[in-house]
Image (cartoon, rainbow, N blue to C red):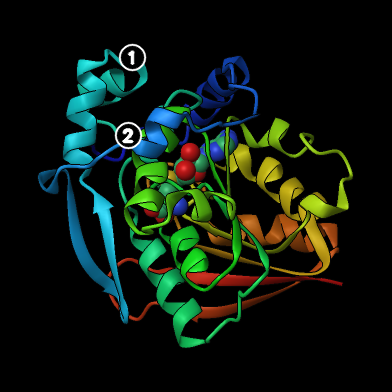
Amino acid sequence: MFKFGFTKDAVGADKEDNEEENKLEWIPAFKFEITPEQIEAKYEFSYYRETNIFSDYNLKLIRSDKVVENLDKQNCQNIIEAESQHSDLIPAKYEGGLKIWECTFDLGQYILKEEIKLKDKLVMDLGCGAGLIGLLALLKDAVVHFQDYNAEVLKSVTVPNVLLNFDDRASILTRCEFYAGDWASFVTLFDDDESKKYDYIFTSETIYNSDNHKKLYEIFKRRLKINGIVFVAGKTYYFGVGGGMRQFENLILKDGCFDVKSVWRSHDGVNREILKLIKK
Ligand SMILES: C[S@@+](CC[C@H](N)C(=O)[O-])C[C@H]1O[C@@H](n2cnc3c(N)ncnc32)[C@H](O)[C@@H]1O
């Protein structure tokens, strides 16, 4: 079982954290290709669950406990290390995509409630993990690019979740692309190819590490269409980690390229919210 992995809370730990961060080696971004074996894979009933977490949509989702078991068996070091540290995240090694984080539910419900039209739009589920937002977008007839830091998450969770929910696998895969690796190099993968710019970028629970805020923001700036919209769902503050919505919002406001509006806030439990960003 994983636990949120950043436990340093002393102010004095900041300097040490920054030094550690500078030493981290981030995996460069690349397009993740699906093999014919994956496309034909059969999933046993016990390997997934059915849920209607989003009203009107009955989604089939791979069970993360089974995935972790399998990755253990395949000797996947990043996952074994995270598990042995009882950690949800190990910076630059494993960034949390195996489990579904709560702001994904907020963002999905927001998309449905606001009836955001996604038909034929190019949508990015940035930091997708299980890919629930991308799945919703596919069900609403969008073309979706899924991005997760860890290729093993794409392979063992995101791709199976897509395949499980559409009978015509060959056809659905013509509406999907998958990308792994670090945001810093993801932003440069297509240079200025206008056909790879997004109508919508959705991102949930991706602002917990303030060292990554600039990378994330650069993607918004360079990969969004002129009239595109970004939705950022996250906790107002990530205790024990340091990242938070106000800090991220200030970075965006300082740069002055986007209008920023808080469009949704939670009224119970841990403070969570959704920001909407539109290019000026
Ligand atoms: C906490 S998980 C959230 C997953 C999912 N959006 C959800 O809400 O359930 C953070 C996501 O951001 C991605 N991520 C974090 N830092 C990243 C980085 N520097 N480069 C690329 N992806 C990153 C992780 O791979 C993961 O998909």
| Number of residue marks | 2
- Asked whether mark 2 and ligand 1 are closer than 8 Å, the reply comes as no
Of circles 1 and 2, the one toward us is: 1
Amino acid tagged 1: Gln
- SS at badge 2: loop
Q: Residue at x 51, y 25 (%)?
A: 92
Q: Residue at left 40%, top 62%?
A: 104
- Classify residue 102 as left or right of residue 251: left
Quadrant housing residue 23: top right
- What type is the residue that disc 2 sits on? Gly
Badge 1 is on which residue?
77
Check disc 1 and report its element: helix, strand or loop: helix
Q: Is residue 231 above or below residue 77?
A: below
Is ligand 1 within 8 Å of the beta carbon of the residue shown at mark 1?
no
> As displayed, is residue 70 above or below residue 254?
above
Is residue 186 visible in this depiction of the protein? yes
Counting residues from the start of the chain, the first of labels 1 and 2 encountered is: 2
Tag 2: Cα neighbours inside 10 Å, few (<14), some, or many (≥20)?
A: some
* Quarter of the view holding residue 102: bottom left
In this picture, residue 133 sits left or right of residue 84:
right
- Check the picture and name the quadrant holding the N terminus: top left
Please state which of residues 37 and 105 is positioned toward the viewer in this rendering: 37
Location of mark 2 (residue): 5
Q: Position of residue 218 (x, y in %)?
A: 76, 46
* Label of residue 185 in the image: none
Residue 127: percent from left, percent from top: 52, 46
Q: Position of residue 143 (x, y in %)?
A: 62, 60
Mark 1 vs mark 2, CA separation in Å = 16 Å
Marks 1/2 in contact by CB < 8 Å: the verdict is no
Q: Nearer the viewer, residue 199 or 220?
A: 199
Which residue is located at x 46 percent, y 36 percent? 11
Q: Is residue 153 visible?
A: no
